[in-house]
Image (cartoon, rainbow, N blue to C red):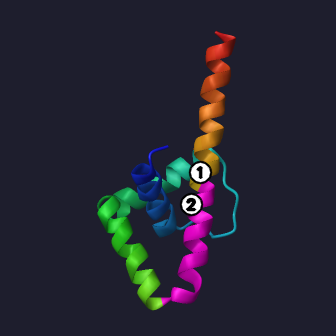
Amino acid sequence: MRSQLLAARAAALFASDLPAGSRPSPLVVGTAIAGAVRQYGGTRGCVAQMAAAYGDYPETAAARMRWARGVVETAHRAQHQQRHRKLIAA
């Protein structure tokens, strides 16, 4: 996945209401990202929420961002593998 897309999705997941430490399914991840993007008016709004969190709660923001990046990478990998299996089965 392109790093800019990964960063945008991770920022949106960071801004979402999903609790850090959870291991949501790819469908839940996508829904949470889409909801945060809508709620904050796009990915720039999500990044602004993330920046505010780093300013207000730096001790927890870094851990939440590590969680968000890991969840986004895992969800992307799972979706990629699922598409690959469908292509092979076809």
Tag 2–tag 1 contact (CB < 8 Å): yes
Q: Looking at the picture, how far across and down is residue 18, in whole percent? A: 58, 65
Q: Secondary structure at mark 2?
A: helix
Measuring 51% from the left and 88% from the top, which residue is drawn there?
A: 57
**Screen quadrant of the C terminus:** top right
Height in image: 59 above or below 6? below
Q: Which residue is mark 1?
A: 73
Kind of residue indicated by mark 1: Glu
From the viewer's side, name the closer residue of 17 and 80.
Answer: 80
Q: Which residue is mark 2?
A: 69
Q: Looking at the picture, how far across and down is residue 75, in whole percent? A: 61, 46
Kind of residue indicated by mark 2: Arg
Height in image: 88 above or below 15? above
Q: Residues within 10 Å of mark 2 (few under 14, many from 20)?
A: some
Q: Is residue 35 visible?
A: no
Measuring 50% from the left and 61% from the top, which residue is drawn there?
A: 13
Q: Quadrant of residue 38?
A: bottom left
Q: Which residues are magenta?
A: 57-71
